[in-house]
Image: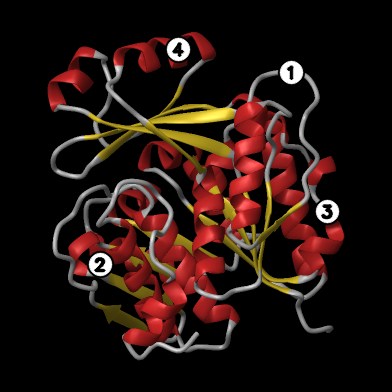
Amino acid sequence: MTAPRYDVLGVGNAIVDVIARAEDDFLVGQGMRKGAMTLIDEARAEAIYAAMGPAMEISGGSAANTIVGAASLGARAAFIGKVKDDLLGRIFVHDIRAAGVAFDTAPAAEGPSTGRCYVLVTPDGERTLNTYLGAARHLGSHDIDEATVRAAAITYLEGYLWDPPGAKEAFLRASAVAHGAGRRVALTLSDAFCVDRYRGEFLDLLRRGIVDILFANEAELHSLYETAHFAGAVAALRQDAPLAVVTRSEKGCIVVAREDTHAVPAFPVERVVDTTGAGDLFAAGFLTGLARGNDHVTAARLGALAAAEVIQHLGARPETALKALAAEHGLVV
C-alpha cells in the first residue's frame, strides 16, 4: 500500500453559515427546535434571514469545518462537496482553499443556489441550525474523485449526507473506494434527529464494516440505541464499531475500542460563546492525531483542544493556528 498523500479527506455538504445571536423567544416564535438541525426550503430560508438580526457569513458545513480544522493542525487535508458557481459558492471555494485544503469538486453551472445554514446562537452558547442544502443536495457519486479517496489515510463522512439520495450514493462509493485501497472510513452521526431518521441504516453501516470509526455525542448515542442507559449504549457500541468516540461536552469524551475504553477530559475554557462546530473540531483533532500515528488518548486530547478553541468565539472554524496551540500544550502533531 502506497503512503497516503492526504491525512484526512472530508466528504460533506458545502454550506455557507449565516450566524446571528438570538433569544430563546425568537426560536419559539419561529417554531424552531432549540439545539437541532432542521432542513428547510428556499422560501423558509429567505423568511428566516429576513427575521433574524445582524449576521456574519462564513464558509461552513460539518465535514468541511472538520477538514479546515485538520489543516489548521498541520494535516494534509482535502474536501469533496458541491456548490453552485454563484457568489456564495465562490466564497466557499476561496475560503476552503485559503485554509490549505485541496478542493477540486466542479461547481454546478445551473440548478439551486449554494447551500446555506442559518445558525441562531442563544445566550447559553447553544446553536440552532436551519439548513437549506441547495446545490449541496446534488453531490453525487460522479463527484467522488477515486484517486483522491485512494490517496487519503482516512475518509471522513458526515451523517447529514444521508438526507439527499445522491449524496448517500456518493457516501457509499467513497467508502468502497477507500476500503479497496486499504484505507479507513470515519462517520459522524451529525445530529440526534438525523439518527432518528436513519437509525437502522447507520447501524447497518457499522455492522457491515462500511464505517470503521464513529463519532457521536451523548444524545446521538442514546438515539442510536434507543436507550437512556449510557453504559448499556457504550457496551452495544463496542460490539458494533471497531473504534468510536463519544463526546460529552464539559465531561470530555470516551474512546471506545474493542479491547479497551479511555476517558479523556475536556480542556478548560474561560467562557462558552458558541458551541457551533465543537463536534466538528473535536473530530478534526482526533482524526489528525490518528492519521499521524498517535495513540487514541493523544488523538482525543488534540480533539478536546480544538473543540475548546472553537467554542470560545462565534463561528465553527478556528481563529487560532491549532498546530501552534497544540505545541503550547505539549501536543506534537
* Residue position for label 4: 46
Disc 4 residue crowd, few under 14, some 14–19, many 20+, Cα 10 Å: few
Label 1 and label 2: CA atoms lie apart by 47 Å
Residue at screen point 26% across, 14% down? 30
Name the residue carrying label 1.
111
Quadrant in the rendering for residue 140: top right
Q: Earlier in the sequence, mark 3 or mark 2?
A: 3
**Residue type at mark 1?**
Gly
Q: Nearer the viewer, mark 1 or mark 2?
A: 1
Left or right, 89 with respect to 311, comes to: right
CA separation in Å, label 3 and label 1: 22 Å
In the rendering, at what x and y percent does residue 76 appear?
Answer: 65, 72
Relative placement, left or right, of 10 versus 129 is right
Label 3 sits on what residue type?
Asp
Q: CA distance from mark 3 to mark 4?
A: 33 Å
| Picture coordinates of residue 168, whole percent (x, y) | 67, 40
Up the image or down, 323 lies above or below 122; here it is: below
Query: Of the residues tagged 3 and 2, which is closer to the observer?
Result: 3
Q: Amino acid at mark 2?
A: Ala
